[in-house]
Amino acid sequence: MRKGPRVSLEERFFEKVKKGDDCWEWKANKNNKGYGMLGGPRKPDRSGRLMLAHRVSYSLAYGEIPKGKWVLHRCVNPGCVNPEHLFLGNNVANVRDMHGKGRGWGGIGPDTAYAVLWMNASGFSRKQISAEYGVSVHAIKDITQRRSWRSLSELHD
């Protein structure tokens, strides 16, 4: 069991933040997508869950996050935990925001995804298309087979 005084979530959080003039960078553990991770409160059985740092930041600044809501970034820095850069949305808003910032599959934005579909329909090979846009053949295949960008027309309505 831990000895000494308990440190609050807020104190633990800010120990791991480097505040800048714009983004506040998370200095500790990050997941494979670049989002900060913070260990959750310990339970009597010593289990604790990992929390996304930007969600912790949002809840410290604005209160509890409603069930089913996502915390999205205004900036394009997943390691940013500045609450002024965060806003609430749902999964659809998250996908639209991601694609609007050109962070879709393989770094392909919606305009490029349309071009990929046009080139595929015009007879270009996946290898040619991947070379043109500097992404993997697999990313091109996912677009042309509609495994990614299924909602492409919805994003532009």
Image (cartoon, rainbow, N blue to C red):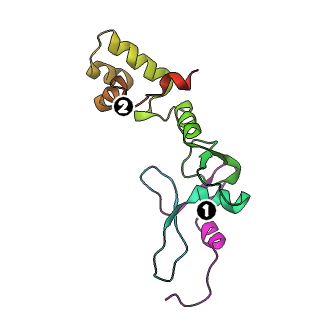
Q: Amino acid at mark 2?
A: Arg
Is residue 18 inside the magenta stretch?
yes
Farthest residue in the front direction? 67
Magenta stretch secondary structure, dominant: loop
Is residue 53 inside the magenta stretch?
no
Position of 94 relative to 69 (above/below): above
Q: Is residue 26 visible?
A: no
Q: 104 or 34: which is nearer to us?
A: 104
- What is the span of residues highlighted in magenta in the rendered image? 1-30
Callout 2: few (<14), some (14-19), or many (20+) C-alpha neighbours within 10 Å?
few
Position of 50 relative to 4 (above/below): above
Give the side of residue 149 with respect to residue 85, left or right.
left
- Residue receiving disc 2: 147
Mark number displayed over residue 17: 1
Q: Can you give x and y, in whole percent of width and height, for residue 147 in the image?
A: 36, 31
Residue ID at (29%, 28%):
137
Position of 114 relative to 10 (above/below): above
Q: Can you give x and y, in whole percent of width and height, for residue 47 in the image?
A: 45, 76
Closest to the camera, between mark 2 and mark 1, is: 2
Residue ID at (58%, 36%):
97
Quarter of the image with the C terminus in it = top right
Q: 65 or 121: which is nearer to us?
A: 65
Q: Amino acid at mark 1?
A: Val
Q: 69 or 104: which is nearer to us?
A: 69
Q: Secondary structure at mark 2?
A: loop
- Write down the quadrant of residue 126 in the picture: top left
Q: Can you give x and y, in whole percent of width and height, for residue 27 in the image?
A: 54, 61
Callout 1: few (<14), some (14-19), or many (20+) C-alpha neighbours within 10 Å?
some
Q: Can you give x and y, in whole percent of width and height, for residue 5 in the image?
A: 62, 87
Q: 72 or 32: which is nearer to us?
A: 72
